[in-house]
């Protein structure tokens, strides 16, 4: 069993994914630990699927690939199911997560059931940050907590901590981490925040949060929060 699996949901990242993997590999090699990258590729149409197969051995990749879109949340859930490691680190594949933050996460890995990042200086587009703040108000009403950044995609946990609660994670797809934190609050799992450096995307544009789609995404995920809140 590997000690650490790094789960990355990937969609149309052919031009940047190797830079992300290379940067993370260089950082992880500083530590005396066994690790594997679990790539949950989500029906990409830009050649990402074929490119990942070419670099599979170079970066110790476990490929979980689909021919059709399953969505961000389902990709992360599949990554959790696929991983065989004791610890799981979930990050985005767009280069916004800084590998240099791994050191403090690993140092604090047993401080709580879940260690999550806090983007104090978030680099996302203004519209997305506004909708995120509004969504946080609803999230706080439904799942009260002291978490500052419930949607941060830099999360470390033991598989045995989260695996029993996977059924609670199916209600939000694009807003998966909102639902993840809601699940933690609902099940009284201790969450510990650490500040992280949030960088600009390597390719400069999001594949999911296009401005005109944000209102419908927010509504869909708000309904998901409500389902999560009242499910037994």
Image: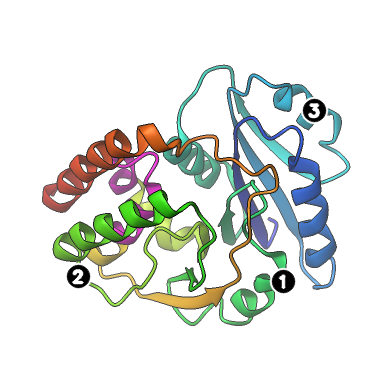
Stretch of the chain drawn in magenta: 167-183
The numbered dot on residue 51 is 3
Where residue 61 appears, as percent x and y from the top left, is 75, 42
- Identify residue for label 1: 100
Mark 1 packing: few (<14 Cα in 10 Å), some, or many (20+)?
some
Among numbered discs 2 and 1, the one appearing first in the sequence? 1
Q: Could you tell me which quadrant the N terminus lies in?
A: bottom right
Give the class, few, some or many, for how many residues have Cα within 10 Å of label 2's Cα (few <14, many ≥20).
Answer: few
Q: Position of residue 125 (x, y in %)?
A: 48, 51
- From the viewer's perspective, is residue 53 above or below residue 181? above
Q: Is residue 45 above or below residue 209?
A: above
Report helix, strand or loop for mark 2. loop
**The residue positioned farthest toward the front in the image shown:** 126
With 93 as the anchor, is 55 left or right in this view?
right
Q: Earlier in the sequence, mark 2 or mark 3?
A: 3
Whole-percent x and y of residue 210?
45, 35
Residue drawn where x is 66% and y is 70% of the image: 102
């Amino acid at each position: 069993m590997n000690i650490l699996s790094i789960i990355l949901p990937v969609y149309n990242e052919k031009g940047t994914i190797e830079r992300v993997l290379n940067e993370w590999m260089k950082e992880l090699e500083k530590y005396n630990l066994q690790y594997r990258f679990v790539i949950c590729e989500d029906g990409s149409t830009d050649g990402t699927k074929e490119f990942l197969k070419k670099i599979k051995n170079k970066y110790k990749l476990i490929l979980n690939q689909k021919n059709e879109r399953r969505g961000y949340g389902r990709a992360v859930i599949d990554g959790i199911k696929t991983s065989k490691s004791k610890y799981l680190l979930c990050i985005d594949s767009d280069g916004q997560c800084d590998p240099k933050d791994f050191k403090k996460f690993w140092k604090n890995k047993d401080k709580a059931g879940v260690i999550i990042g806090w983007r104090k200086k978030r680099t996302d587009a203004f519209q997305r940050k506004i909708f995120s703040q509004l969504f946080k108000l609803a999230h706080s009403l439904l799942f009260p907590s002291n978490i500052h950044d419930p949607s941060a995609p830099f999360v470390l946990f033991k598989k045995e901590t989260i695996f029993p609660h996977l059924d609670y994670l199916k209600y939000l797809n694009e807003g998966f981490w909102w639902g993840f934190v809601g699940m933690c609050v609902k099940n009284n799992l201790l969450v510990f925040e650490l500040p992280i450096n949030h960088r600009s995307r390597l390719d400069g544009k999001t594949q999911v949060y296009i401005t005109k789609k944000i209102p419908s995404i927010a509504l869909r995920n708000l309904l998901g929060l409500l389902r999560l809140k009242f499910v037994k």
